[in-house]
Every structure is written in C-alpha cells, then in structure tokens.
Image: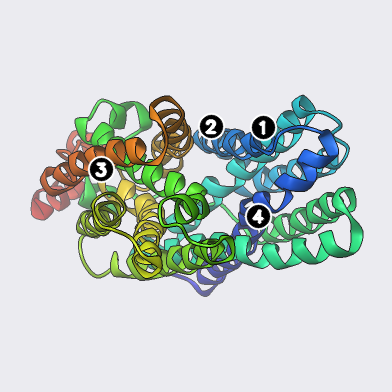
Amino acid sequence: MTKEMNRTRYLTLVGTIITQFALGSVYTWSLFNAQLAAKLDEPVSQVAFVFGLLSLSLAVASSMAGKLQERFGVRNVTLGAGLLLGLGFLLTAQASNLMMLYLCAGILVGFADGTGYLMTLSNCVKCFPERKGLISALAIGAYGLGSLGFKYINVLLLENTGLETTFQLWGLIAMALVLCGGMLMKDAPAQSAASQLAESRDFTLAEAMRKPQYWMLALMFLSACMSGLYVIGVAKDIGEKMVDLPVLVAANAVAVIAMANLSGRLVLGILSDKIPRIRVISLAQIITLVGMVLLLFVPLNANLFFVAVACVAFSFGGTITVYPSLVSDFFGLNNLTKNYGVIYLGFGVGSIIGSIVASLFGGFIATFNVILVLLVVALVISLTIRLPDPKTPASAKAASKGSPRLVNMTAESA
C-alpha cells in the first residue's frame, strides 16, 4: 500500500469519527420531551414517540444508503446528509404541532442521521479490512460518545438560550461537524480480483438474501436490538416501578447504561479481531441473558438492577459494533453497506416491537419474557450457524476461460 493510499484511509477514518460523533447527538432527544410537551400542550408520551419514529427512519435510510453511495460517492452523500440534518433541526425549532414535530424531528432528522451513519461506518470498515473490529469500535464508539458529549452541550444550551435556539444551534453544530467529516472521506477501494479469488465470498444483496444465513443474522440482530433498545428506553421506569428506587437513584441508570454501552462497543469490538466474531456475538447474547434473568427471576435491589441493565447495554453496544464486520465475514466487503443495510432495519423494527408488546400485554414482565425467548433462539442460531458456501467469483470464471496464469493461481489456492 502506498503512502498516499494509507494517508487517504486514515483521513477517511478521522472524517468518519467526526461524522459519527455528530450523528450520535440524536440520542439526547429525551432532554427535550418535557419542554416540547409544554410548548405544544401535548402529553409527554406523544412527544416521546418522536424518538421511535426517528429510530425507524434511521434504519430505513441506512438500508438505502448503499445505493446512494454507489451513485454519488460517500463524500457527496455525507455532505447531503449533513445539510439535511441541519435543516431538520432548524425546522424542528419552528414546529408548532405534533405532526410537524413528527415530520421534522422524526422523519427528516432520522433519515439524515441514518443516511450518514451506516454508509460512513461501512465505508471506513472497508478501508481497513485487516482491522475491521477495531475500526468498528472506534467509529461506533464515537457515535456513542456523541450522545454523551451533546448531552452536556444541549443541557448548557437549554439553560442559557431556550428551546428554539437550542435546536437551531444544535443543528448548526451537528451540520458543521458532518460537513467537515465528509470533506475528509473518500470511497473505499473495491476488493482486488486476487483477494476475491482467495476469499470467494463476495455476495450481492440479492445473492445474500437467498442464503438462510442472512435471515439467521437478521433474527439475531433484531433480538439484540429489541432487548437493548427496550431496556435502555425504560430503564429509569424499571428502577422506579420494579425496584422501588427513588427517582434520583433510578435516574443513575442512564449514566450506568452510557458507560456500559460504550464499554461494550470498545471491548467486544476489539475482541472481535482476536477471536471469531460469531463467538463474540454468542458471548454478548449470554451476557444479555444474564441481565434478563436478573430482571425476571431475581429479587432486585439497586445494585442488581444496575448490573442487569449494564449487562443489556454492554451487549447491545458490542453487538452493533461487531455486526458490520460479521456481515462482511459472511457476505464480503464490496456490498457491505447494502447487505448490512437491510439487516439494520431490525434496529427500527426491534424498537417498535418492544413498545408494541409492552402496550398489548401489560408492561415490563411480558416484554422481558418475549425477549428472553428470542434471545434463547438467537443464541442457538449463533452457536450453530456456518459461513455460506463460497460462490465462484466472476473473475474466477473469466480466468478459467482465458488466463492460464490465473487458472494456475486458482488451482494452487484451492
């Protein structure tokens, strides 16, 4: 690899980290629920639905980002996402009713965030095929740090400038960061013919979706997202209602979750470069099961409650970090953004399913039982799943027809 190529990929990494930090800011949304409810004279629960809509829009946009990158390139799509993100926040500041809030903050901001999130992550992972786990950990760790960093930024802005100005400044800051990050990025090079011959596992989305392994990975991801997003979203309420903790003590679950989530991203991401990634997912599933068993079957005190939610948050953070590299292990790097994009729909679907189960069947316990069953099924899958059979690359077919040298290379590698 030349010095120029090495410099380019490290600039792409820096740009991706800056962009991910800005995009992670949407996870401070809960700071605004009460003030928006007062402004619009609507129940907090109706305002809080914005975040579920945002998560769904994020997941849908992530599934489409691969096609946008193919047509316009990672830099242009990232710049467009940054501008759309800023516009979404500026319009949110002017929202005067719930529908406008849902459209601007839920759909527009969510779509912008999802367009940039998965595409820049996947592109960066493809730049470092030899260190996929570490790169995922750095990029997604930055996404998690964004929620923590912008928590302090947005609290400071709310205290000093008011609700509308906070949204405007938040949008301008996030947009500026994404634009700066986007300018540093370049599209990752496609895998060479030689590496495709050696690997013989580089599936298009249509080819991947015909493999049972694709849907096994999708179910595993959905289970992880449903458990993680549901428990993280109601952790404070669990502490108050199931453990009878005072409000201030239960609120400490937010800090515990943030630290555990970030730790899971870093620890499991780095570990995934040391041992098979599917085993890292199995480990994450077992840790989540420990947390769910504590919540369901053990009389909880404050310490056990914090351990339980930390187990779930640690595993959730680690899972979403390892999954891009895991999908590339199964289906190749060249089509990673599209192949992972459809699986990533499980992020939005999982968050909504958890809320629906809770509303239909009476809250925490019923939802925990459904999650427990899904996790057991997912663990069985992760322990038994195998890589799909290698396909014959087009380059290998061409080689078999015309190039004796490549035919010999293919035979020797076999």
Q: Are marks 1 and 2 in contact (CB under 8 Å)?
A: no
Q: Residue tagged by mark 2?
A: 60
Secondary structure beneath label 1 = helix
In the figure, 219 relative to 261: above or below?
above
**Residue at 48% of width from left, 32% of height from top?**
352
Q: Are marks 3 and 4 in contact (CB under 8 Å)?
A: no
Report, in whole angstroms, how far the alpha carbon at label 1 lies from the one at label 3: 28 Å
| Front residue of 141 and 262 | 262
In the figure, 118 relative to 358: above or below?
below
Q: Residue tagged by mark 1?
A: 46
Would residue 77 be seen by someone viewing this image from the given angle? yes
Residue 350: image x %, image y %?
42, 36
Between disc 3 and disc 2, the foreground one is 3
- Left or right, residue 266 beside residue 161: left
Residue 102: image x %, image y %?
71, 30
Between disc 3 and disc 4, the foreground one is 3
Q: Are marks 4 and 2 in contact (CB under 8 Å)?
A: no
Q: Are marks 4 and 1 in contact (CB under 8 Å)?
A: no
Q: Residue tagged by mark 3?
A: 372
Which amino acid type corresponds to the residue marked 2 in the rendered image? Val
